[in-house]
Amino acid sequence: DSGVTQTPKHLITATGQRVTLRCSPRSGDLSVYWYQQSLDQGLQFLIQYYNGEERAKGNILERFSAQQFPDLHSELNLSSLELGDSALYFCASSVVQRGGTDTQYFGPGTRLTVL
Amino acid sequence: AQSVAQPEDQVNVAEGNPLTVKCTYSVSGNPYLFWYVQYPNRGLQFLLKYITGDNLVKGSYGFEAEFNKSQTSFHLKKPSALVSDSALYFCAVRDPLTGGGNKLTFGTGTQLKVEL
């Protein structure tokens, strides 16, 4: 158990809908990362937050948004869902260290199925 | 831009034999390199990382990896494989010269199958 929790574990929804994925980082970790794992794209970085502020953006669609709250938990919002958004969404957290040498610890993921 | 290649989709090895899972990388500067393992229906578990120093890095569950700068490689190794090592292994890289964040770039993964 990495200490990173994600809810829900599974989510089944229809095209055009909106969902929210939730992540609680390990105790003491200020940085949260979101990754998407799909069969065709592999593991891709979406976005990073550090202490409530957006730190870096990757291949995140405009239909997707995220935020990190004062208690450091994070939510990933996916809207206008398409079939191709079906994937495993991982959250990771880390204690950001000088020089970026920190290790990211991953949660169990949320499996999203869009029908 | 940083990138990682895992040239083998699958590696098969007999239990008790040594195993190697290959990884090569491309970054602008000196890389930070990581190995993660994913068991079915589970998240990624951290195995080990190379930041600087000794080229041979030891990690969890008896795994180790060797950093080779001239060959831009970071192969994962274990002297004696176990059936329970069967899983999907990911190599990842972070380029410390890339500003604005600590994102990891992952390879496509290598499925390791250890057979009796």
Image (cartoon, coloured by chain):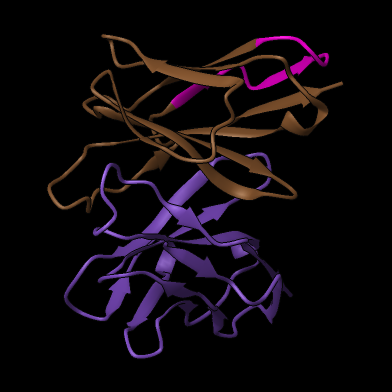
Judge left or right: residue A95 versus residue B92.
left
State whether residue B33 is above or below residue A30.
Answer: below
Shade of chain A as shown in the rendered figure: brown
Judge left or right: residue A8 versus residue A81.
left
Chain coloured purple here:
B
- How far from the left and from the top, in percent, is residue B22? 54, 78
Quadrant location of the N terminus of chain B in the rendered image = bottom left
Judge left or right: residue A40 versus residue B68.
right
Asked which quadrant contains residue A24, the reply is top left
For the record, the magenta segment spans A5-18
State whether residue A15 is above or below residue A27.
Answer: above
- How far from the left and from the top, in percent, is residue B28? 32, 70
**Count of numbered marks:** 0
- How far from the left and from the top, in percent, is residue B94? 35, 58
Taking the magenta stretch, the answer to whether it contains residue A27 is no
Asked which quadrant contains residue A94, the reply is top left
Q: Residue at x 27, y 42 (%)?
A: B100
Judge left or right: residue A9 versus residue A34.
right
What is the residue that sits farthest to the front in this orientation? A62
- Residue A108 appears in the figure: no
Taking the magenta stretch, the answer to whether it contains residue A15 is yes
What is the residue that sits farthest to the right in this orientation? A115
Q: Residue at x 42, y 72 (%)?
A: B26
Along the line of sight, the residue nearer the viewer: B57 or B70: B70
- How far from the left and from the top, in percent, is residue B97? 24, 59
Q: Residue at x 67, y 76 (%)?
A: B8
Quadrant location of the C terminus of chain B in the rendered image = bottom right
State whether residue B48 is above or below residue B81.
Answer: above
Q: Residue at x 46, y 55 (%)?
A: B105
State whether residue B55 is above or below residue A53.
Answer: below
- Residue A61 appears in the figure: yes
Along the line of sight, the residue nearer the viewer: A114 or A92: A114
